[in-house]
Amino acid sequence: MSSMCFSRCYTAHDRKIAHLFGRYGRLIARHPWVFIICSIVLSLLLGIGLIRLEFEHDLETQYLPENNKASKDRQFLMSMFKPDDNDNFQIHSLADVGYFAETIISSKNGENILDGNAYQEIVQIHNLITKKIKISPQATTEFTYKHLCATNRRTCVVFGAELLAQDFPQNLRSGNVTYPLYKSAILLSPMLGKVVVKNDRLLSAEMVKMRYYLQDNPESQEQLSEAWIKEFSRVMGELRTNVTEVAYTYHNALDDEVASSSMAEAHLFIITVGLMVTYASIITTGRRINCVYDRQNLGRVGVFCAILSMVPAAGIASACGVKFMNSVGIMPFLIVGIGINDMFIIMSGHAQTIGQELTVAERMDRTLRTSGLAITVTSLTDLLTFFIGYTSAFRTIQNFCVYTGLAVFFCYVNQLTILAPSIVIHEQWINAAKHSMTCKTTKPRAQLRAEGHSACYVTCCSGEKPTSRADLESALESYPKRFFQFLVRNNVSRVIIFLIYSGYIAISVWGVTSLKQGFRFSDLALEGSAYYKSSTWDFENFKWEIPLQIVFTSPVNYEDNATQQKIFDFIERLKKEHLIKDAPEINWLSTYQTFSNNGSFGDKFESLRQFLNKTEIFSNDVKFSADFSSIDLSRFYVFSENLRTSDVQGQFLLRIRELEQSSEIPCFIYSPLFVFFEQYAIVVKSTLQTVGIAIAAMFVVSFLFMPHPLIVAFVTVSLVSILLGVFGFLPFWGLNISSVTKIELILSVGFSVDFSAHLCHAYLTSQSDDRRNRVRDALELAGGPIINGALSTVIGLVMLVFSHSFIFQSFFKVLFTVIVFGLIHAVLFLPMFLSVIGPKVRILPETEPDKRPDLYNGVDRDTHNGAHHPLVLKEMT
């Protein structure tokens, strides 16, 4: 009884939607050209917004969470702790990464770079950078690094300059260079790579890092600094050395790298379009050449619909101020890949009507009754996925979802308003026996042979109406689904499929337990670029030991011993953390106590202010009130241990946030790199949360369009199983969870449900009583579109393999995994389970059994191995 209730409920629900699509099919049958022309013109008009297209190359805007705490802390520091003058530059007190040019110099033969010829080349490269790289904005003026550098006590500030001090080589040879802390204040570990240390004494190193800071305060000076950096980049790119090798970068090198490579992969898209047109032409060619019902033109129209959908999508997004970002470059490949999936479904629905004496209007009525709902469900799931992805805190994901979501919507619209009317025109040509390419009237093959024409002429110029679905299907459509039908009906193969599925689940679970979060900004650069080389060397060979600014934000009585003790206790508590060093420490309060006779700050802090002015290292670490009645802000510094990997960086930031809350005096802890650490701290939680919401949304959509609890459960379990495999196989691809792969994982939710939904919907439409026959019918109806859709998506993405961009390569890896697992679930795993425990509910027929359409042309169903036409179609008598 409950089964019959669900059957009647589903039938009424399905028929109402099918009736609307049927009426639309009859409408386009009367005015096909009107729909085609209006749709193309509207798309082009909406594409006018492209004149406002803007590119966003600032990676901080793209890949970091919006309104994150570290960015707010940075703005606070920049507003409150402004340098008193330009001759007191302190690296550790920077609120951002600063303006700089950087070199990493490596010994070619693996010998000690701090001695001999290698060391002399370091000195020569340093002199080249500081003295010989020149810019001449005017004919009469010339600037070198010394004119533009950030200074302290009238000396250019160079990170790593201590290695070039006159006494350093001698101290190294005599074993007097302590490591990692040299002369009790100089931290050597971030400057040297591949070091050899014995008894805390530095013996040798193979790599040296030097960073040259420039002024960035006055606007005119900033322009000069940028011009010098461009010249630096040119000179270093042409530099040739003997015993060393040089990598170089500068403060915004990655932004420039991304900007210059935005269109570097455009040729891959052109090749992709060619591949997709070729594939669509092949798949729409029947097993036998027939110039009348040949559907290659329809395949090309389907590709055109996908390409055209990007025009209004980009136009609307640009008009709304949504900037084109690096990740959006994936959109054309994705849309071309998935855009023709709806085409296969519509053409499959049309093929089901072949062999029946119907008018064009009746044929389009039946075509869209069967396929309209199917493409609506999959398009809606994809759109929901993009809508949910837009709620992400990452701007790059938001913009990608806007562009691609709009393109998916217009692709759906184009298939209904361009492809479907094109099928009407195709039908009209068939009825008029016109050649599909030349539009001339043709004759049947037998008649041309009887007239004595050559075999070539007969092959290229003959044609007649198709008599069955088999006439239209290509070998790629018919044979694969026959193979899968055999597998899921055979008991032995079903056991093997179950064992394969069990192994798949086990491997996926193991992979999930090995999954990590991680991201390197060098992945955004093209392989082989200057930035990629420098960043890779830096990541693999140097320690990331960064200064941490402890900023106390509340006015307190710093002369009070209890207050001082709270500050010192908090700093000591920080240094007990395993990722924070004991030394060095920059502490104006403890230093003042050491040099002060009585510890008094004097009237209106006169004594303290004199001390701060004399010891310039502390001069910008205390912020007094306007009348010098109190200290409003102050800051202290400690240094972290090595924070090289992104997972460590994310965990460290979360721990720092916990420690901030434990301070008895309000404070925050900051480093310029915290702005980049923000994404590592939230990306895993954010990804899992977004994917969870998307899964719930897919469940709701499945229930609305397939209101049977067991079928919805099958779709949902299949979705979760596919996603488990996608997450589990990320480590095998060498991928981690990051703001880049998060885009792909969100997309995986929508794509994972598509194939399973098609199969389950086809299962419900079968009129067989036996589960195995119902599965066979489902594969007959949906197997071809599912397989073709999977292949077309892979072809649309395959050129990304040849890209030098990590974003493109990772996108292919994840989406390829989704498509392969989705296909295997839809044609193997899911049919196997449905054949055993699938529900027996089905759509109730509108007609009597003896009046149902015979789609097998009198052939026994077991012999044909085919499927009944879905009985939501009304028999035309």
Image (cartoon, grey):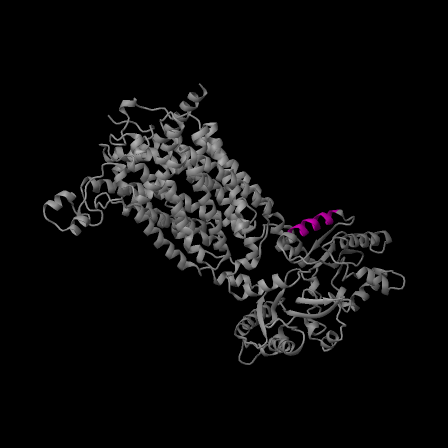
Among all residues in the image, which is located at the extreme right?
598
Query: Is residue 300 visible in the rendered structure shown here?
Result: no
Give left or right: position of 398 versus 178. left
Instruction: Tell me residue 706's x, y (percent).
Output: 43, 30
Res 5 quadrant in image: top left
Closest to the observer, 384 or 271? 271
Q: Quadrant of the N terminus?
A: top left
Q: Is residue 546 above or below residue 768?
A: below
Among all residues in the image, which is located at the extreme front?
492
Give left or right: position of 150 versus 793. right
Res 287 quadrant in image: top left
Q: Quadrant of the C terminus?
A: top left
Instruction: Tell me residue 548's x, y (percent).
Output: 71, 58
Instruction: Tell me residue 50's x, y (percent).
Output: 41, 54
Closest to the observer, 16 or 86? 16
Among all residues in the image, which is located at the extreme top?
1
Give left or right: position of 41 versus 399. left
Q: Is residue 811 above or below residue 256?
A: above
Give left or right: position of 753 versus 690. left
Instruction: Find the magenta span and give its range.
Output: 650-661
Asked whether 841 falls inside the magenta stretch, the response is no
Q: Residue at x 77, y 61 (%)?
A: 583
